[in-house]
Amino acid sequence: MKIELEGKVLDCNVQYGKRKKLSIHIDTIGLITVKVPRNTSEELIKSAITQKSEWLLSKLAAISKTKERPKKRVYHQQAKFMYLGKEWDLHELIGTEDLDEEALRKSLRKFYVSIEERIKKFEKQLGVKPKTIEIVASNTKWGSCSSDKKITFNYRLVMAPLGVIDYVIIHELCHLIHMNHDRSFWRRVGSIAPDYKEKQTYLAQLMRCL
């Protein structure tokens, strides 16, 4: 969902679920998530966001200021890294004892490649099988599918929540059925991931933070 606050257009990831109250969260990289009860109207959601506009804009300004002073990524036990949409200390994700910075970097990337475990589930559901699957590093794409049925996924995808990861996998596997982004393609994607537009919003925000 997009909403304008004081001349700024914000992308908000709206999540519907079994809950009684609406809540608004903003993480350390500026991704806004609004959790709402099922059947909450768009009007009510926008009203709640507007009421929190001062807090949201101040948080975003602080995050933006931090980004203006980029720091070299440091690898140590307490260094912060995103995994499945949450921030973790490095030692919570991988073993860090007796490893130097280069070894930690390689070990973390190997850990991130765990996305492969999610692919088999949707291959079976869609009845497709890519020729090859490769995990790559990219600053521009989360995934791709070539005309010869070769699929790639960005290893940084595991920074996103599990539902978002699943959407990208579904998206690329659906290209084995429909190579173009036509109506038939989006209908097939939507049959498995009906909230794919929300996932696209999240991914666009996350890509800007890489």
Image (cartoon, rainbow, N blue to C red):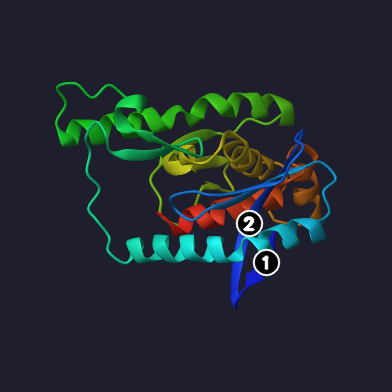
Is 23 or 195 nearer to us in this picture? Answer: 23
Q: Is residue 179 something that shows in the picture?
A: no
Amino acid bearing label 1: Ile
Residue at image point 65% right, 44% down? 171
Do the residues bearing badges 2 and 1 touch, measured as CB atoms within 8 Å?
yes
Is 149 or 163 nearer to us in this picture? Answer: 163
| In this view, 63 is above or below 9 | above
Residue at image point 65% right, 71% down? 4
Identify the image quadrant of residue 11: bottom right
Other residues around mark 2 within 10 Å, as few (<14) / some (14–19) / many (≥20)? many
Identify the image quadrant of residue 15: top right
| In this view, 131 is above or below 56 | above
Real-space Cα separation, disc 2 to disc 1, in angstroms = 8 Å
Q: How many marks?
A: 2
Residue at image point 73% right, 61% down? 46
> Horizontal placement of 121 versus 38: left or right?
left
Q: Position of residue 130 (x, y in %)?
A: 59, 34
Q: Position of residue 88 (x, y in %)?
A: 39, 34
Is 178 or 13 nearer to us in this picture? Answer: 13
Please, which residue is most extreme toward the bottom here?
A: 7
Instruction: List the residue tagged with mark 2.
Output: 12
Instruction: List the residue tagged with mark 1.
Output: 3
Mark 2 vs 1, N-terminal side: 1
* Image quarter hosting the C terminus: bottom left
Amino acid bearing label 2: Cys
Residue at image point 48% right, 65% down? 58
Give the secondary structure at mark 1.
strand
Q: Position of residue 74 (x, y in %)?
A: 22, 44
Q: Which mark is residue 69?
A: none
| In this view, 109 is above or below 13 | above
Give the secondary structure at mark 2.
strand
Other residues around mark 1 within 10 Å, as few (<14) / some (14–19) / many (≥20)? some
